Each structure stands twice: as C-alpha cells, then as structure tokens.
Image (cartoon, grey):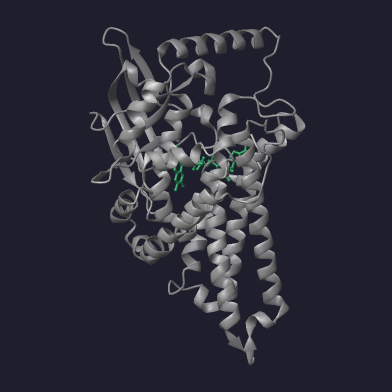
Amino acid sequence: MGEFALDLGDDQKAVRDWVHGFAADVIRPAAAEWDEREETPWPVIQEAAKIGLYSLDFYAQQYFDPTGLGIPVVMEELFWGDAGIGLSIVGTALAAVGVLANGTEEQIGTWIPQMYGDENDVKVAAFCSSEPDAGSDVSAMRTRAVYDEAADEWVLNGTKTWVTNGGIAGVHVVVAVVDPGLGAKGHASFVVPPGTPGLSQGQKFKKHGIRASHTAEVVLDGVRVPGHCLLGGKEKLDERLARARERAKRGKAGVGAPPAEGRGSVRNAAMATFEASRPAVGAQAVGIARAAYEVALDYARTRVQFGRPIIDNQGIAFQLADMRTRIDAARLLVWRASWMAAAGKPFEAAEGSMSKLFAGETAKAVTAQAIQILGGNGFTREYPVERMHRDAAIYSIFEGTSEIQRLVVARTISGVHIR
Ligand SMILES: Cc1cc2nc3c(=O)[nH]c(=O)nc-3n(C[C@H](O)[C@H](O)[C@H](O)COP(=O)(O)OP(=O)(O)OC[C@H]3O[C@@H](n4cnc5c(N)ncnc54)[C@H](O)[C@@H]3O)c2cc1C
C-alpha cells in the first residue's frame, strides 16, 4: 500500500475526465427536467449503462482501486452533474455494499449482478434499514425476521421508510431483527429477490431536494425468502448471536463488555463499515458544492452593478475565497478517509464520519452562499444553484445526520460514551 498522495495516476485522471464528460453532456442538461418531474430518470441510467458507467464492473474497479480514490473521484464528478440523477445512478451501490459487507462469495456473485441488470434491461436496487421509529436509533428497529425451520425460509414483517429506490428496485436488501433481546446486535440482513410476494411500495415521498431520486416506504407483509437469502448464512449468524448473548450475559453480571467504540479507534465491525462508506457520500457533497461555487464564480465575474463586476467587491470575492477553501478542505478529508479505508488504517478519530460531516455541512453552506451571490437570479429556477441548495440539504441528514457524525467523532476521540 502506497503513501497518501494527492496526484491522481493517468488511469484515474482518464476515468475522472470520462465521468465528467458524461456529467456535463448528459446529466447536467437533464437535471432541471427530472427535478421537476420527481421521477427516476430511467433514460439517463440507461445511457450510463450503455457506456458502462452504470455497471457492476465499473464500480467494482473503482471500489478496489488501491489508492482508495477511485470512488470519491467518480462520485464528485457525477454529483457535480446533478445530485438527484447522481443518486439514481449510484443508489444501487448502497444495496450492493450491503451484500458485499455481509454476504458470502456466492451471495455476492449471485445478487450484485442482478442489482444492475444489463444495458438492455437496467435494474436498480434498494437498501432498507430505516423505519418510522428507527432512524438514527437503529436499535429501535421493529421489522422482524423469523426462521421457519421446516420450510428453510425466513418470514419478514414490518415497514421500512425513506428507502432510496424502494419498491421500484428489483433486489431489496432488508435489515431485520432476528433476536429482539440483543438490540442492534440482534439484526441480520436479507436479500429479497425480485418479484417476491408480500413486498410492496408504500407512499412515495415528495421531497425538498434530490427529487429525481425515488424515495418511498417499503411494506413487508409475510414476505418469505429462502434460507440462502440470509446474508452471511445461518451458521455465521448463529455464532454471532451466541457471542452477543454471552457478552450481554457477562455485561449483566458486571464484567462489562467493551464499548462499541473504544478510545483510540472505531472497533465495531458495523461502525468500521460506515467509516469506510461515509467518505463516498462526502464526495457527493463535494461535487454539489463545487458545482455551485463554479456557477457563483462565473456569475460574480460577469454581473455588473455600480459600474463594475460584483467580484470587484471584497464582500463577494472573500465569500468565493471561503467557499473554495472549504471545498478543498472537504475534499482533502474525504480523500484521506478513503485512502485510510483502502489502506486498512484504523480510524483513530472516526475520520470517515469526520469527512462526511464536514463535506455535508460545506455543501449546505456553499450552496447558500452561491444563492446570495446570484441575488434574485439565485433564488429562481432559471439558475441551478437553487436546486443545488435544495439537494445539498440531505447531506446533513442521510447516511447518519451531522449530529450522529459528531457523536461518533466525539466518542472515538474521547472514549466516553457521550449521548
Ligand atoms: C432522501 C432520503 C433517502 C434515504 N435513503 C435511505 C435508504 O436508502 N435506506 C435507508 O435505510 N434509509 C434511508 N434514509 C433514511 C436516513 O438514513 C434517515 O433519515 C436518517 O438516518 C435520520 O433518521 P431520522 O430521519 O429518523 O431522524 P431522527 O433520528 O429522528 O433525528 C431527528 C433529529 O434528531 C437528531 N438526533 C437524533 N439522535 C440524536 C442524538 N443522540 N444526539 C443528538 N441529536 C440526535 C438528528 O441528528 C436529527 O437532527 C433516507 C432518508 C432520506 C430523507
């Protein structure tokens, strides 16, 4: 594993420029239309599939880039194009990562290709964890999975909410409670294959931003999936549950299990997975922020008031300097965390959460400043910064809110179980 380097290699630059070309030529021109329609931009996903930009191979290649920078570079360019369309293209990857993180090799090989479909018949996938009463507090999850030993099937019941691609996906990955006595340790993930009876879409949400991305409830009513749809397999689950029960018993007896995030690093496996995936979401936020900053910089150079371009005023120019500084700082945090994940470095200070926190807040602040610099035009849908600002707002909410990121960083640097 190499040292952290800011220079992209020739292959990485070629990928970045190729994705940028697609973002500029196909995504950007379609952004306003799909934002207004509030529908999944299937034709754009299809175009991406045709050139190989929506495919398992492409994301796998980026995911396994040894420098760790493959995914953040691609995310930044796609979301520079448009966040709603960007999420429609990469939403499937969230479900794919769910299988990659927990599945056996056979499950990975079976389900992930099905999530993407092929260029003539593209599919999307969904990852269903959140519930109406279990957002930040995942341990409050109620969706139940009960094993029917005679049939070797799992039966799922519950309601998931805010699911990206929920109900329109082929493959749904569902997190459910298998042992209610164990809190978040009693959860397991299941693949629900396309067309499984009992899974249906509930309400589709009308949203503030990223409106081209479909977000809906998913209702699971007596959904039966074969035993092999339990990610990781039954044997591994039983072992894990036995260990968790043992730890819980010792905890009660006063021996005390170690906290999930001990001083000095993020130790818990699920937390470590989040630490590794959060920089990718941070990179999306960097893309939105950069897009708004570029529009604002251009505008400030050409908009004339009081006989001179508005950028001649320090009040405007300094804002642009701050915007650029924050964006570059956010990218550096994202790249550092991405490199650490690829290099297998321990997250001593929850650097993954840190990068998502800073990049998400940067996107919100920078897009707001961009509206201010564009004045009345910034407030209208004639200019894209209004949409970018609406899109940026989700980046302090999903994949862990900003408060939850602060909680993770604070617990990791202090070793104290801060609430
Ligand atoms: C567009 C969109 C797409 C999504 N896609 C998916 C998806 O594909 N799959 C999926 O499973 N989920 C998805 N989500 C759900 C998302 O992950 C949750 O909305 C998020 O985790 C926050 O949960 P919540 O909305 O219930 O907020 P809550 O947890 O109710 O939080 C409300 C407020 O309280 C704060 N808060 C909560 N606990 C604490 C605390 N301990 N300390 C300080 N502050 C706290 C939060 O930061 C927030 O400000 C999506 C959400 C949206 C809006």
Q: Is residue 284 visible?
A: no
Residue extending furthest toward the bottom: 307
Image quadrant containing the N terminus: top right
Indicate the position of residue 94 as horizontal and vertical percent values: 44, 38
Query: Which residue lies at the image location 35% right of the left edge and 13% below the top edge?
Result: 147
Query: Which residue lies at the image location 59% right of the left edge and 87% below the top edge?
Result: 304
Residue extending furthest toward the front: 10
Query: Which residue lies at the image location 45% right of the left edge and 55% below the top edge?
Result: 19
Q: Quadrant of residue 103?
A: top left
Indicate the position of residue 397 as horizontal and vertical percent values: 54, 47
Left or right of residue 344: residue 186:
left
Q: Is 369 situated above or below 409?
A: below
Image quadrant containing the C terminus: top right
Residue 42 vs residue 146, the one in the foreground: 42
Residue extending furthest toward the right: 414
Indicate the position of residue 364 as horizontal and vertical percent values: 58, 58
Q: Is 401 situated above or below 298?
A: above
